[in-house]
């Protein structure tokens, strides 16, 4: 296959540094002038690299500290770093495009409980103590729910979690005494203590005691003592199996290379865990007070931080 001008532009959009663009044009004669064809900057620019992209009309700002240029034909900006929804409203009249808008607790108090379609993430404690909230639908634009986002929403009875969600903060549904119905499009597994969701990242939330319906169907909470992690899973989230006291056996597949912080903390019944050589990183407290803690301590490949209760107690207050 012979690459043409259009194809090489698509490929070069994924370059990370200006030297990659320069090497392309110096190394392949027929691709000289590739940078001049761009009408936006595919990488952050400084005064040196700016001169190579002479025909930019839309300026992309990838990081908050990026240099911003107003010269030439530039008439619009695309902002990729995170901004609050209130900031977006104040600045959108300038014609800029915002790719990462967070709805904060202050935004919610000012603009209401309906999550705007432009929002990409819900901030820490966004709906905390929102006791009048009885139901909520999270738009498909949202990919992240922050820590304690719906903490103490005691009247919340139902919630829809779209498949776009790839990160749930800790205690995001804690103290939900009225929650009886929840929709999770990427539901993987339900146990007595946990709901596990979202490939290829496996994370979990504690099942509220009042929860009765998932995806419109009555649920039967089962006391599962063995969990099989699918080979499609590439990453485990912090606290993923934390306090799963009924878990007795688990195998970490070769697709996973890291056991995160507090992952198996407090799994007091865990007696069998198979850890393959693919694991290259262990998080703090990941085996603290698990049932096979003493056996794992004899494995020289597992660092002491995995059993460090001091780390857990110190961070329990600051999480």
Image (tube, grey):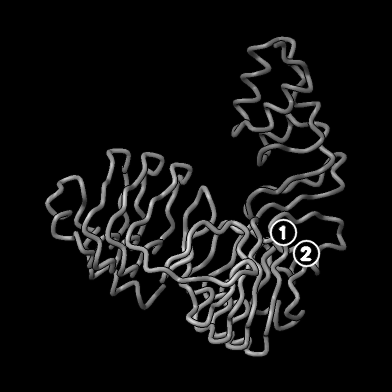
Q: Position of residue 198 (x, y in %)?
A: 54, 55
Residue 296 quadrant: bottom left
- Tell me if 267 is positioned left or right of 99 in this view: left
Decide: is 233 above or below 183: above
Q: How many neighbours does mark 2 have within 10 angstroms: few (below 14), some (14-19), or many (20 or more)?
A: few
Decide: is 71 above or below 186: above
Q: Secondary structure at mark 2?
A: loop
Pick whichever, 35 or 203, lies toward us: 203
Among the two numbered marks 2 and 1 on one chain, the one whose residue lies closer to the N terminus: 2
Q: Residue at coordinates 28% horizontally, 66% vertically from top-left?
A: 267
Work out how far the residue at label 2 is from the one at label 1, CA to CA, in angstroms. 6 Å
Residue 249 quadrant: bottom left
Pick whichever, 188 or 146, lies toward us: 188
Q: Quadrant of the C terminus?
A: bottom left
Residue 29 quadrant: top right
- Tell me if 289 is positioned left or right of 28 in this view: left
Q: Residue at coordinates 63% horizontally, 12% vertically from top-left?
A: 27
Q: Residue at coordinates 72% horizontally, 59% vertically from top-left?
A: 141
Mark identifier at residue 141: 1
Q: Position of residue 201 (x, y in %)?
A: 49, 51
Pick whichever, 315 or 157, lies toward us: 157
Decide: is 35 above or below 142: above
Q: Position of residue 308 (x, y in %)?
A: 22, 64
Mark identifier at residue 117: 2
Q: Quadrant of the N terminus?
A: top right
Q: Position of residue 11 (x, y in %)?
A: 68, 26
Residue contact at pointers 2 and 1, CB within 8 angstroms: yes
Q: Residue at coordinates 76% horizontally, 65% vertically from top-left?
A: 88
Decide: is 278 above or below 283: above
């Amino acid at each position: 296959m012979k690459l043409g001008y259009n194809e090489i532009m698509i490929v070069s959009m994924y370059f990370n540094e200006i030297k990659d663009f320069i090497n392309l044009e110096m190394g392949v004669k027929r691709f000289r002038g590739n940078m001049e064809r761009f009408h936006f900057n595919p990488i952050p620019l400084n005064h040196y690299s700016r001169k190579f992209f002479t025909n930019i009309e839309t300026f992309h700002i990838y990081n908050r500290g990026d240099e911003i240029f107003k010269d030439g034909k530039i008439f619009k900006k695309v902002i990729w770093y995170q901004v609050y929804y209130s900031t977006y409203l104040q600045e959108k009249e300038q014609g800029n495009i915002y790719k990462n808008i967070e709805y904060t607790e202050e935004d919610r108090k000012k603009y209401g409980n309906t999550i705007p379609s432009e929002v990409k993430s819900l901030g820490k404690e966004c709906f905390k103590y929102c006791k009048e909230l009885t139901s909520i639908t999270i738009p498909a634009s949202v990919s992240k729910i922050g820590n304690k986002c719906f903490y103490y929403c005691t009247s919340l009875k139902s919630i829809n979690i779209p498949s776009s969600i790839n990160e749930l903060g800790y205690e995001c549904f804690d103290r939900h005494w009225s929650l009886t119905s929840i929709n999770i499009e990427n539901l993987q597994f339900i146990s007595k203590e946990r709901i596990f969701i979202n490939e290829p990242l496996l994370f979990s939330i504690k099942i509220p005691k009042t929860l009765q319906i998932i995806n419109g169907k009555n649920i039967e909470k089962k006391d599962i003592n063995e969990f099989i992690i699918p080979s499609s899973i590439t990453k485990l989230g912090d606290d993923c199996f934390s306090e799963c006291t009924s878990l007795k056996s688990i195998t970490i597949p070769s697709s996973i290379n890291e056991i995160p912080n507090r992952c198996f903390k407090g799994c007091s019944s865990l007696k069998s865990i198979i850890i393959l050589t693919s694991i290259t990183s262990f998080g703090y407290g990941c085996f603290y007070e698990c049932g096979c803690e003493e056996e794992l301590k004899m494995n020289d490949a597992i660092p002491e931080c995995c059993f460090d209760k001091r780390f857990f107690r110190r961070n329990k207050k600051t999480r």
